[in-house]
Amino acid sequence: MTIAIGTYIRLLNANGSDTGYRFQNFFKGDTRTYNGQTYTFSGFGFSGGTLDLEGGNISASLVVALNQLSLAVYTQAANDRWLVRLRTVWLDPDTLTESATYSEELYAVTGLEHDSSRLSVRLGSPLDAVRENAPRRSLTQQLVGSLPTTGEISLR
């Protein structure tokens, strides 16, 4: 069985608004429209997320070819703690059309390193324990149903 996997990344400001930077890594030299948005080709690799036992430390990385544009964009992303919305999709190996979404993940850009040929962008959890903030989400009755009003628990 042959499979093909593609990745879309969308860079967002720390408040969740779109920066305009959207990339895909499987249509070389071409743009691709996904969910109504245009993604430009960028040769990058994604390491996949890892999680520690307590669930508090999520890390992953993007590896990108080093050039003036990638260095400028990802340096700003690291300095301003941009977010990366990453979608991994299954592709039909013959036509390279999306057949299903494998995963959708959200990371914060936490830093970067580079050598003479590549840029490694460190990604981590977008949750900020100091400011008690999860990007663009709050628990509301509309999202999760009835919320408790006291700390009491009764078994019936």
Image: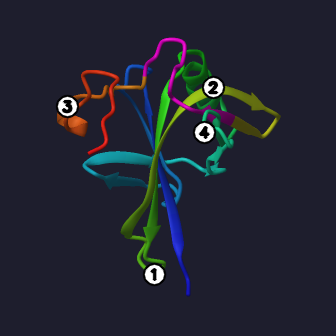
Q: Nearer the viewer, residue 64 or 5?
A: 5
User: Would you say the residues marked 3 and 2 are in contact, meaning their CB atoms lie under 8 Å apart?
Assistant: no
Q: Which residues are magenta?
A: 121-133
Looking at the rendered image, the disc whose residue lies closer to the viewer, 1 or 4, is: 4
Q: Which residue is mark 2?
A: 110
Q: Earlier in the sequence, mark 3 or mark 2?
A: 2
Query: How busy is the neighbourhood of tag 4: few (under 14 within 10 Å), some, or many (20 plus)?
Result: few
Looking at the rendered image, the disc whose residue lies closer to the viewer, 3 or 2, is: 3
Q: Nearer the viewer, residue 10 or 147?
A: 147
Q: CA distance from mark 3 to mark 2?
A: 32 Å
- Disc assigned to residue 55: 4
In the image, farthest residue toward the front? 156
Residue 13 in which image quadrant: top left
User: Would you say the residues marked 4 and 2 are in contact, meaning their CB atoms lie under 8 Å apart?
Assistant: no
The answer to whether residue 123 is magenta is yes
The quadrant the N terminus occupies is: bottom right
Give the image location of residue 132, x and y in percent: 46, 16
Query: How busy is the neighbourhood of tag 3: few (under 14 within 10 Å), some, or many (20 plus)?
Result: few
Q: Which residue is mark 3?
A: 141
Q: CA distance from mark 1 to mark 3?
A: 45 Å
Q: Amino acid at mark 4?
A: Gly
Q: Secondary structure at mark 1?
A: loop
**Depicted 72 relative to depicted 100: above or below:** above
Q: Earlier in the sequence, mark 1 or mark 4?
A: 4
Q: CA distance from mark 4 to mark 2?
A: 17 Å
